[in-house]
């Protein structure tokens, strides 16, 4: 069970890293454009924190949030996949 949860978290981290890369490569010209994209992702706070320098990486953000929030995001992630 622990390995399954770790694997789910690692997949979720990879998903958010991919979304972060997409935002950076899109070269949006306004904060509004960035916000419109980010708010449609599964974990907008993660991307906003990393983009604004409040977290140094996706992994740091994910590992810093309470476990019940991680589980909530993982549930959303499994449905969207």
Image (spheres, grey):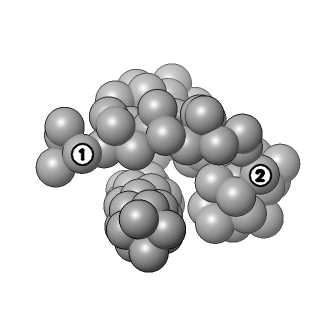
**If you read the primary sequence from the N terminus, does the residue marked by circle 2 or circle 1 appear first?**
2
Quadrant the N terminus occupies: bottom left
Circle 2 residues within 10 Å: few <14, some 14–19, many ≥20: few
- 23, 63: nearer the viewer: 63
* Residue 28 seen from this side: yes
For label 2, the residue is: 64
Q: Which structural element holds mark 2?
A: helix
* Looking at the image, residue 76 lies above or below residue 6: above
In the image: residue 74, left or right of residue 58 = left
> Where does residue 5 sit, x and y in percent of width and height?
44, 62
**Residue position for label 1:** 78
x and y percentages locating residue 29 in the rendered image: 49, 41
Q: Residue at x 64, y 66 (%)?
A: 59
Residue 21 percent coordinates (x, y): 44, 66
What secondary structure is found at the residue carrying circle 1?
helix
Residue in the image at 32% along x and 34% along y: 76
Depth check: 4 or 76 in front?
4
Is residue 64 rendered to the left or right of residue 70?
right
Q: Gap in Å between the C-alphas at discs 2 and 1? A: 21 Å
Residue closer to the observer: 32 or 49: 49
Which quadrant of the view contains residue 36?
top left
**Residue 41 visible in the displayed image:** no
């Amino acid at each position: 069970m622990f390995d399954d949860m770790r694997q789910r978290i690692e997949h979720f981290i990879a998903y958010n890293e991919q979304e972060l890369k997409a935002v950076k490569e899109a070269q949006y010209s306004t904060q509004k454009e960035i916000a419109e994209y980010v708010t449609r992702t599964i974990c907008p706070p993660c991307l906003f924190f990393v983009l604004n320098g409040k977290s140094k990486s996706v992994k740091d953000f994910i590992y810093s949030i309470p476990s019940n929030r991680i589980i909530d995001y993982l549930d959303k992630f499994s449905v969207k996949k």
